Image (cartoon, rainbow, N blue to C red):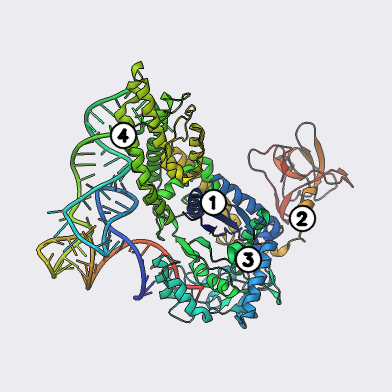
Amino acid sequence: MTKRRILVTAALPYANGHIHIGHLVEYIQTDIWVRFQKLRGHQCLFVCADDTHGTAIMMRARQEGRSEEALIAEMSQAHQADFAKFQVAFDNYGSTNSESNRKFCHEIWEAQRKAGRVVEAEVTRPFDEQEGIFLADRFVKGTCPRCKSPDQYGDNCDKCGCTYTPDELIDPVSTLSGTTPTMKATTQLFIQIEPLHDFLTEWTQCGQHLQDEVANYLKGHFLGDKLRDWDVSRPKPYFGFEIPDSTDNCWYVWFDAPIGYIGSTHDWCQKHGEQTEDWWKNPDTEIHHFIGKDITYFHTLFWPAMLKTAGFTLPTKVHIHGFLTVDGEKMSKSKGTFIKASTFGNHIDPTFLRYYFSSKLGSRLDDLDLSFQDFIDKVNSDLVGKVVNIASRAAKFISGSELCDSYPADEGLFEQAAAEGEQIASYYENCDYSQAIRLIMAQADRANKYVEDKQPWVLRKDPEKATELREVCSVALNLFRQIVIYLSPVLPEIAQKTGELLNDPITSWEQSQTPITGNKVEAYQHMLKRVEEKSIEIMVEESKAENSAEAPAAGSQWNDSAEPLEAEPLAEECSIEDFVKVDLRVARIIEANHVEGADKLLQLTLSLGGDATRNVFAGIKSAYAPEDLIGRLVVCVANLKPRKMRFGMSEGMVAAAGAGGKEIFLLNPDDGAKPGHRVH
RNA sequence: CGCGGGGUGGAGCAGUCUGGUAGCUCGCGAGGCUCAUAACCUCGAGGUCGCAGGUUCGAAUCCUGUCCCCGCCA
């Protein structure tokens, strides 16, 4: 077999949210494919990165009063932790906000300019005067002009399905500030796609690069008409890369996001002494993108167009998958089926999700349904009851001893399964994982029947049959190992444990073709624990709770007024170093008194636990009575320089929100916080 | 409205291109085994393959019509 050089990407997760089980369909699908290719001995590089730019990130950072860089750094850590937990192993995980990415954005932009593909045009966009930014369609909400449904986004109505522009909305409102946007003219930069129309038709319709249904979709929806120019600039302020020859603008996030694939590859090359050109400007390198169907046109029209113009290698194949549904419905926050990867991983072994997805994934872009009952039945019976069970029932009769020195007669089982190897491999290659799993499970059934027929538990009782017992176990364990090799792209952890059990690490697909002999068998330990229905219930409940807690931060649906933020605009940006200078502590109010002669102040004695106390004068008399305060927990600034006041020394402040007067609200830590805990 | 996908025993699916009266996994019922995480093995019940026509010696499979579901429209 010739060794292929394969570059694989999964879509870049947006830094505005955590990884959830819907995302995992893609990362698990891709990771399996990559592990399969590596197992087959090909050179395969798997890169990804966080997608970090855009208005959403900018606004969230503002709301949270920190820099975009701090926000995206935190999200990148969280994303990578989630991926690691689900055994998704990237060779490099980068960021679109990197210098390598900027470099390739410049290069590709330069190429578009040179080719004469960039044009300017004036467009009128909704503008938020208060925030001072132009609004994307989804940041404008209002009443649908056709069916009058309230609270619809600026591009289309999800009630009646009609499309329109934001200025057609009745009573439009900026979701950022709550103010009414004005329409303002701006000059933006566009990349022309139409000159590549013929090329794109050929590239998409030739049957090599896309699934048939995707090719049909493009043909029917886009390629039948003139291709519109693509709007790739956004006026500042915008969190993104400044366009070098148009410095009032940044590139639209969707311009630099796919270029992140190249940036991340470059990062890897730098670390491993390789040339990026060998991966991206080399017809011998295969490039495979795995994406969801929601971003089809970016990857099948814009992206090939940009690459073509800039002289990069075009994707060999774009693999497009459908969405995840849960129990037949869209994931729902209120039903608790919008489950974050971290939440799932806290309750259920990620191996099970990898297996379940693979048992249902085909090569087409059908949606995939996670039915909890089906999930429990399938993973328990297939993985625990069938696969792992083979080792569990055979290993104990031989552990501590060795497998036979030559592989015994096994009624042709090993050979039959070995012969099926190429068929299984071809299913993996074509992303028909469900078919591969089908074949492999049939092998597991045969192996279990073999053990059943040979009755090692009976042989064990007769010392004269010791040799036969050893043979049966050698066969069973070899059949088990063969199955695990076939499953190892899906179940890397089980492969690892099997390697340890039999003292022979699984590193190559070829190992499935030859039985091992003479290896010492270690003591068998459970490789998987069955899934309990209870775990699912707890996980769903927890997801419900998480989502209802998060909802207020999401803002718009609660109709919170913009007034408080307007009344007191955000302070100047501060660094994390600045923030940690302020030592906020949980404290208990152990004494509260009126202050003789003061009309706003109360005197509080705060306990930080143990003997540590602070005497604090707080301007909260108008809202709180001293007797109501005693015993409650508050947050105080514990390292504030003491200040002498008319009534005595004040050694800190208590944190409170509100406009003043009756509207003063002390911060209250959730249950469980103890005096002395620092607030981070 | 348009485009795309789909409707097969209780559940999830394969089979449809290359027609020959239906298959897999789970669940269910009976029995067996007791090595194994109530795991494993055997047998069984259960489907007029959405509906109605048509082509054919013969259709889940091809054709026409029809009902329903889902997805997509920068």
Is A366 above or below relative to A579?
below
- Using the image, determine if residue A516 lies above or below residue A652: above
Viewer-nearest of labels 2 and 4? 4
Return the residue at label 1: A547
- What's the chain of the residue with tag 4? A
Q: Do the numbered discs 3 and 2 sit on residues whose CB atoms are within 8 Å?
A: no
Q: Which residue is mark 4?
A: A449
Residue A672, by quadrant, is top right
Find residue B66 and report its image quarter.
bottom left
**Label 1 to label 2, Cα distance in Å?**
29 Å
Relative image position of residue A523 (x, y in whole percent) = 48, 26
Residue A450 as seen in the image, left or right of residue A664:
left
Residue A64 in percent (x, y) is at: 68, 57
The residue sitting at 60% across, 62% down in the picture is: A278
Q: Does dot 4 land on a helix, a strand or a loop? A: helix
Foreground: disc 3 or disc 4? 4
Residue drawn at x 79%, y 52% as measured from the top left = A578
Q: CA distance from mark 2 to mark 4?
A: 65 Å
Does label 1 or label 3 sit earlier along the sequence? Answer: 3
Q: Nearer the viewer, residue A531 or A401?
A: A401
| Mark carried by residue A54 | 3
Q: Nearer the viewer, residue A189 or A521?
A: A521
Specify which label sits upstream in the sequence, 4 or 1: 4
In-front residue for pair A382/A6: A6
**Can marks 4 and 1 be said to lie on one chain?**
yes
**Which one is closest to the eye, mark 1 or mark 3?**
3
Foreground residue among A392 and A256: A392
Instruction: Specify the label residue A238 is tagged with.
Output: none
Residue type of the residue flagged with mark 4:
Lys
- Disc 2 secondary structure class: loop
